[in-house]
Amino acid sequence: MEDDDRSYYDITAFVYIGGRAFTLDEIWSGVDAVERAGVSLGEISRALTHNWTAAVTAIALGNIGVLRALVDEASP
């Protein structure tokens, strides 16, 4: 959801994973990239539920192969 002034989140905020820090902009840009590569939001959600740390890292780095592997691992 978004405020009328479009300040719902600060894209310069960080998500820390291990020794790395990713900006929200890197993560949202990664989501856009993996969607363009054919990974659905439902699949992204399954990967995040299965292994949040690995999925966020793969998304932020644009590593579609790792994300697809996580989706496959999460599938019944």
Image (spheres, helix red, strand yellow):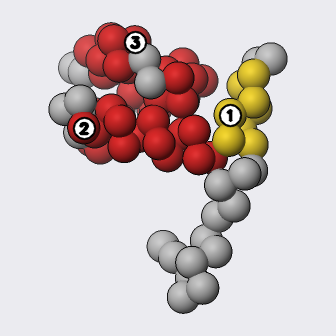
Amino acid type at mark 1:
Phe
Q: Is label 3 in a helix, a strand or a loop?
A: helix
The quarter of the picture where residue 69 lies is top left
Q: Is residue 73 visible?
A: no
Q: Which residue is mark 1?
A: 22
Amino acid type at mark 2:
Arg
Point out residue 52 in the picture as x, y percentages from the top left corner. Answer: 54, 28
The circle on residue 51 is none
- Give whichever of discs 2 and 1 has the lower sequence position: 1
Q: Which residue is mark 2?
A: 36
Q: Would you say 75 lies left or right of 49 here?
A: left
Point out residue 26 in the picture as x, y percentages from the top left corner. Answer: 57, 39
- Give whichever of discs 3 and 2 has the lower sequence position: 2
Q: Measuring 40% from the left and 12% from the top, which residue is drawn there?
A: 66
Q: Is residue 74 above or below residue 65?
A: below
CA gap, disc 3 and disc 1: 17 Å
Q: Which residue is mark 3?
A: 66
